[in-house]
Image (tube, rainbow, N blue to C red):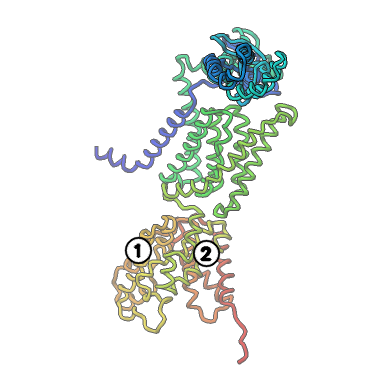
Amino acid sequence: MRKFLDKLYKNQSLIYKYFLYIVSICSIVFFFPKGGTFKYEFQKGKPWQYETLYAPFDFSINKGSTDITKEQQLIKNNQIDYYTYDESIVEGVYLTYEEEFSTVFPSANFSNNQLPILKKVGKDILAQFYEKGVLKTTDIKKSSDQIYLVRNNEAKSIRLNELNKIQDVKYIVKNTLDQKRLSLYNSLFQELFFDLVKSNISYDKELTNKTLDDELSRISFTRGMVDEGKKIIAKGEVVEAENLKILNSLKSEYKSELWTQNNHYFILFGYTILVALVLMMLFLFLKKYRREIFDNNTKVTFIFCNILMIVFVTTLVVKYNEAYVFVAPLCILPLILKTFFDARLGLLVHVLTVLILGFVVPNSFEYIFLQIIAGIVTILTVSELYKRANLFISVSQITLIYSIGYLAFHIIHEGSLENIVWFTLGLFLLNGMITLFVQPLIYINEKIFGLVSDVSLLELSNTNSKLLKELSNKAPGTFHHSLQVANLAEAAANEVRANAMLVRVGALYHDIGKMSNPTYFTENQITNVNPHDELPPKDSAKIIVDHIIDGIELARKNNLPDRVIDFIRCHHGTTSVYYFLKKQQEIEEEFDEKDFRYPGPVPFSKETAILMMADSVEAASKSLKNPTFMMIDAFVDKIIAGQMSANQYINADITFKEIESIKKIFKQKLTNIYHLRVEYPE
């Protein structure tokens, strides 16, 4: 049992990777749509490359979305509105007429023979008004001449202009009285009917919408059937409008038909195998070419989490509406990976993710082609992401590539630039705008996974930051030394194509531990009094060595990233405090040499190796008196040769050629710093 636990402990990192691998496969397959995959790829305007295809089963020919939309729009345009005739309003108007008539036509002013005649004329006018009904102009919903008027639960088709309007009162009263030769009473009747007539016809929105919904529901989404065994398309035949619709119908029917059978477990198994192969390629690449990332489980988890995020977002968009597939910002993935790692890894992960999504998206060839090209453009154009203008320029180029690629495919399919779907070009623009969200995503990833980007490094390089400000106040000599080392290291990093920003930040913070005892370091001593003169060499060496431990503790307290702390930890490697070691040898012959040696580790990257060289050369250069070019040349060679003979760079990924280039840069910089000046006359 103990051996098993020991073996489990030793291989826990590898076991975690297997676990992450299996969880990622299961998650991706779970995101995939539940349906089979059509085994033929075809495009409009291109010949059918497979053998002659016959219908494997009976299926309906689906109408295209454009055809269905046209039918729906035609029904909406031809829809006849419904209006309701309200009898109760008419009855109320007649009752009001009976009450108001005696007020307008008092019996004292008219003879008994005139009043019945006038009253009957008024009823005739009302009857003329409400024979078809009265409608307000504001109730007219559209300009169609034909409407349905619902009266006594019966709908009758009439013309809209047959209905009376409220504003017609004046003309109807006048015309009727003229016909009856009673024009003398026009003003009295006008006064009576002006407030009496009310509209009794209203637009019936509920009935109109219900009728419209019924008509729309009757639209058939299919047109015709294809019987089993019927030839669909022959080999070499061009895929055109008619057989394209049949092939698309077969494709959609094939997916649902295949999934409903008992072989859906085999389909899931097939998806699992293909996804497993893709992710295995990623693991193999990391193990062979990016060993430092493969050994770091946090970084591996970071890569897989970002892949899962992109797959999840894309499949979510596809399930909602396939037309929006290009809204998913896939170029965020290479942007993030290039920020934290390198361009080659970013491009590989992007391509592998696109291959996975090829199982999900429609028109997979076009999608994969456009996304891979866009990913390559992203990798080639994005540099120095901490500069905001660079991100905007890169996103603009990505959007342009999407648009050009879409137009090229459109020309291939349609043979011209007509019928361009501008909505799709709008999706590319929206994709670019969402891609700008990469900056906050980088920040979130930094906090979750403890990584550091160039944006954070730029913030840390600000000499007005709290920690560097404190260093300049407590240990001004050390601060000046750190600035000089930063300049040397940055120039050397640029020469050998290392991460210059990271080296500069590491150089600025590498000696912050000296703030604990600043006067024990010569660069901070402003008098001739040296506190080491009163201490034994062993105690002096301990104070010097402890600035590494103090620096690490101070860095952690101020939440500096681990990549910056690495520079503090290994900028002296496992070298010895040579000055006090020699003094101890003069006092006694037998002593523990470990007390005079830095704890290490030795530099393990190109950047940490550059800092170690720059720090040693800059510090030792202060001892040169009246330096010449020859002195500086020999001096730099001696310092770095001593470190190489002490095996300080055996773990660093740096070559002899790069070391020679670094030495050349150091010699040029130091020569410029210590150049001779002419003596000015007194």
Seen at 45% across and 57% down, the residue is 650
Seen at 60% across and 53% down, the residue is 389
Q: Which residue is mark 1?
A: 549
Q: Position of residue 154 (x, y in %)?
A: 56, 8
CA gap between label 1 and label 2 equals 22 Å
Q: Position of residue 338 (x, y in %)?
A: 54, 47
Q: Residue furthest right?
A: 416
559 w.r.t. 234: above or below? below
* Left or right: 668 in relation to 640: right
The residue carrying pointer 2 sits among few (fewer than 14), some (14 to 19) or many (20 or more) residues within 10 Å by Cα, namely many
Towards the viewer: 301 or 648: 301
Q: Position of residue 513 (x, y in %)?
A: 38, 67
The residue carrying pointer 1 sits among few (fewer than 14), some (14 to 19) or many (20 or more) residues within 10 Å by Cα, namely some
* Left or right: 522 in relation to 345: left
Mark earlier in primary sequence (1, 2)? 2
Towards the viewer: 544 or 435: 435
Q: Quadrant of the N terminus?
A: top left
Q: Amino acid at mark 2?
A: Ala
Q: Is residue 50 visible?
A: no
Q: Residue furthest left?
A: 1
Q: Residue furthest bottom?
A: 682
Seen at 31% across and 39% down, the residue is 8
Q: Amino acid at mark 1?
A: Ile
316 w.r.t. 101: above or below? below
User: Quarter of the image holding residue 321?
Assistant: top right
Tag of residue 71: none
Q: Is residue 241 visible?
A: yes
How many marks the image carries: the answer is: 2
Towards the viewer: 665 or 33: 33
Seen at 62% across and 88% down, the residue is 680
Q: Which residue is mark 2?
A: 489
